[in-house]
Image (tube, rainbow, N blue to C red):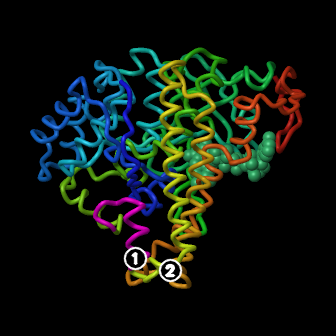
Amino acid sequence: MPVAVASARIQAGWAHLVTIDETYAIVCLMIEDDAVPIDDASGIAAAARGWFEANWDPDLTLGEWWDRLAESGYGFPTWPSDRYGLGLDRHDLPLVNAARRAVGALGPPAGIAPSLAGPTLLAHGTAEQQDRFLPGIVHGEVWCQLFSEPGSGSDLASLQTRAVRDGDQWIVNGQKVWTSGAHIARYGILIARTDPSVPKHRGLTYFVIDMDQRGIEVRPIREITGRAIFNEVFLTDAVVPVENTIDAVGAGWGVALTTLANERTMLGAGSFGSSGSSMSITKPDLGARVGDLVRDTDSMTATPSGGVGALLRALVEQYGRGDDPLIRQEYATIHSLLEIARYTDLRSKAAVERGGRPGPEVSVGKLAASHLLRTLRETMYRVCGADATLWGDDAPLGGRMHDIGLSSYLISIGGGTDQIQRNIIGERVLGLPGEPRVDKDVAFHDLLVGTQRPLSG
Ligand SMILES: Cc1cc2nc3c(=O)[nH]c(=O)nc-3n(C[C@H](O)[C@H](O)[C@H](O)COP(=O)(O)OP(=O)(O)OC[C@H]3O[C@@H](n4cnc5c(N)ncnc54)[C@H](O)[C@@H]3O)c2cc1C
């Protein structure tokens, strides 16, 4: 369905930006979908509005509300209709989100489980695996992503964690790092090396691992903000049943690319937060009254609408900087960046429709998010001056300016650094010569790069 952009009014949500302990993704900006008038020839908006009006009840528990979203398909409307969705086109998602927000309803679960694991299982998992894992995901289970290792971040394919088949199970040994939410995760999506005798990209396999087992030790890493959202994860003879192998043995790199593309889409400036919930890394309290959680989110946004535009405007007014030409210019820059990000996101969505998988456009979106966040941080600091360094309830935004500043680096690193996104854009969008890859055809156990030690086959 064509998206008719008749208005440039942008309201970018702030909720994720100010709830920094919940996920590293939350430093991204959310463009409120209902800011954009959309052609609703098929009546999707009306149907969604009707459903939310009939079903939203702030007195439900969070668990009951997420049950309703899951069973109706309105939680993840772009998923297949026999898999907790409605089979809607991504272009129609804003219609559902707008209908939800119109009644003030809380969104579905968010974070790694529904944004990365769910789409990966839908693309690569068997029907049995989807039957087994998707119910937990749509009902708020927390998952983590066991990809990065001390010597393998940007060069992820050089990872060393080994999985060795032993009868009906895989035995996993190694170390992961920067694993957001591992301390509360029920399952992890894991890539491990199953064949070191072939080149690095070809010897990897993708698994779902149960985090609740003796062979897994999770150690928190304290951040500059004082929080510990990510962890080191040590796997010592950890066990994965063979039925948790996602796709073929040795096909893990292709599966991981699906996860990574979804991650960049999630983190991209144009699409983040479409699910609307910010409860992904703290373990959701399924017994809590859902209406109270909406109120909590509102109070964290510091503005009723939760929009970046509204937030900046409120700050500018509070500090009497509305006539400052420099601030006005920066305000216009941020508005333009948000618009560009939104168009890039629409291009990315169109590419998904054509090709089935997010393409290099997602790198542009992620890079834009990174730039946008830094620009926003600088502007807010300029408006607040030294007040931005204050911490505590009586500081601007309840002290969150400080938080935003300290956390603004996250988006430039997590999900692939800015430099890596530029490499992707250079090679795959601009057609520039690729980086020399001398290790491409070399058996992994013959490689000596980074912190790797030679492995025996
Ligand atoms: C907040 C946060 C949360 C995270 N959560 C998770 C998680 O849940 N699960 C997970 O698996 N990982 C997670 N990560 C890890 C993240 O994916 C890695 O940090 C990221 O991929 C970069 O890897 P690295 O830290 O090893 O840096 P390196 O790869 O060592 O890079 C160091 C520097 O070298 C540059 N560089 C490296 N290679 C190139 C190149 N080829 N060309 C140009 N420059 C290059 C990089 O841009 C960077 O500036 C998280 C990271 C952050 C910051």
Picture residue at 55% right of the left edge, 82% below the top: 385
Q: Quadrant of the N terminus?
A: top left
Residue 301 is at least partly visible in this image: yes
Residue 116 in percent (x, y) is at 49, 35
Residue 233 visible here: no
> Against 402, is 160 above or below?
above
How packed is label 1: few (under 14 Cα within 10 Å), some, or many (20 or more)? some
Dot 2: element: helix
Q: Write down the region rendered in magenta.
A: 303-317
User: Is 315 covered by the magenta stretch?
Assistant: yes
* Residue 384 numbered tag: 2
Horizontal arrangement in the rendering, residue 60 relative to residue 173 (left or right): left
Specify whether tag 1 is near ligand 1 (CB below 8 Å): no
Q: Position of residue 422 (x, y in %)?
A: 72, 42
Cβ–Cβ under 8 Å for marks 1 and 2: no
Residue type indicated by callout 2: Cys
Horizontal side of residue 444 vs 408, given as left or right:
right
Location of residue 219 (image quadrant): bottom right
Which secondary structure dominates the residues rendered in magenta?
helix
Up the image or down, 56 lies above or below 353; here it is below
Residue bearing the label numbered 1: 398
Name the residue rendered at 43%, 83% in the picture: 320
Task: Please rate how many residues cluster around mark 2, counting C-alpha atoms within 10 Å: few if below 14, some from 14 to 19, many from 20.
Answer: some
Mark 1 is on which residue type? Gly
Q: Is residue 227 magenta?
A: no
